[in-house]
Image: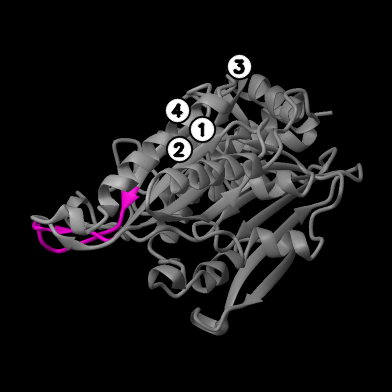
Amino acid sequence: MREVEKLEEKVEALRDFGVRLLSDLIEIKAISPDSGGEGELRKAEYLMQFLDGFEVERIDVEDERAYGGVRPNIIAKIKGKRGKTIWIVSHMDVVPEGDEKLWNTPPFKAVVKEGKIFGRGSEDNGQSLVASLMAGKAILDLDLEPEYTLALAFVSDEEMGSEFGIQELIKRGIFEEDSLVVVPDGGTPKGDMIEIAEKSILWLKFSVFGKQTHASTPHKGINANRMAMKFILKVDEELRKMFNAKNELFSPPYSTFEPTKREKNVDNVNTIPGLDVSYMDCRILPEYSLNDVINLAKSVKDEFEMKEDVRIDVDVVQKNSSPPTPADAEVVEKLKKSLKITRGISAGVYGMGGNTCGAFFRQAGFQTAVWSTVDNTAHQPNEYCRIENLVNDAKVFAVLPFIT
């Protein structure tokens, strides 16, 4: 396949271009207004100048909190011989730097050393954004016509829920019904695994109402702290008992129900609290219904209230689920072939406990594969992208629309 050799050589020749572009993007802060930033418009405007030869559309979603009053989304296409489109969807927004004292380099000034590019947003998601652009640029520079249309989407608001990005684009019908979607927003250090399924996520809030009193007279009150501990242990026991299936696609291969955050109750040691608010993070295998989990938690609550002189509210803080992509789906098979051709990798498939923006595509019925080659430094101090990962992933993306 002579085209493959040409594409790989061209991507390799674009290495310095990719390093420079990613370095420049790191220095353009694109933090959500929800996190105190101004949004993605400056980054989008900078990226637009590198899209000569693409069919380009910019879709702005109004957000008065953001710089320019909009959250931009860029679509850049290269038409193929066939009607079907392969989408590579990456995001422009980044999370804040966190405690800058934990960084060895300035978080928003790119530093290139030891074969890596350091800076906030380098790996999440700048690496994949630039890699997809390098792939498209290689195709255009060689004046090749891919078998399938290649569409790059640079979206906003991924870090804070995708309301102004992917979710809005799906609502507007931007993605064709038979689209194949690659979301390079998760991966493994070797790039040898393709994520095809995600556990459902459910965050539950438990508010336990007792009666506050002095700690020396507990008989005059109802200790919401003690009641909350007993209740949460019971909920935990019953959920684990009922939803106990195993699915080896995931690690761990079972649903998890973890008590996590606890809100402050009283300021002093010698007061029995009258209110205790706690949370549980549930990551549930996709074969289970989230409503069944919620209903079981509420039935435990009802039984507990009958036995104890206490009132409990069970509230859903977050709820999200998506069907898995079949292991033999077309997008998975094409991605596997591209990996084998370009890198000699025989990729496997897996599921993950976290959620990616790929879930929105799966909910909408699109075949979706989440893949990239990353060291998983996202959201950490000293986040970095390996330059070899940038270049090698670009080769996979460049060959992908030529796979029949």
Q: Which mark is residue 164?
A: none
Secondary structure of the residue carrying numbered label 1:
helix
Which residue is more in the foreground, 276 or 280?
276
Q: Is 314 a magenta residue?
A: no
Please report the residue visible at 45 percent of the width from the left and 60 percent of the height from the top.
25
Q: Earlier in the sequence, mark 1 or mark 3?
A: 1
The quadrant where residue 54 appears: bottom right
Q: What is the residue that sits farthest to the right in this orientation?
A: 82
346, above or below 290, in the image = above
Where is mark 4, residue-wise? 189
Residue position marked by numbered label 2 in the rendering: 235
Name the residue that disc number 1 marks: 239
Marks 3 and 2 in Cβ contact (< 8 Å):
no
Count up the numbered dots. Answer: 4
- The reply to whether residue 5 is in sight is yes
Q: In the image, which disc is placed on residue 344?
A: 3
Distance (Cα) linking label 4 and label 2: 37 Å
Give the CA distance from mark 4 to mark 3. 15 Å
Residue 36 position within the rendered picture, expressed as x and y whole percent measured from the top left: 38, 73
| 61 shown above or below 163 | below
Q: Please, what is the three-letter code of the amino acid marked with disc 1?
A: Leu
Alpha-carbon span between mark 4 and mark 1:
34 Å
User: How far across and down, in percent of the image, does residue 243 sit?
Assistant: 57, 28
Q: Which residues fall within the magenta stretch?
A: 261-274
Q: Earlier in the sequence, mark 4 or mark 2?
A: 4
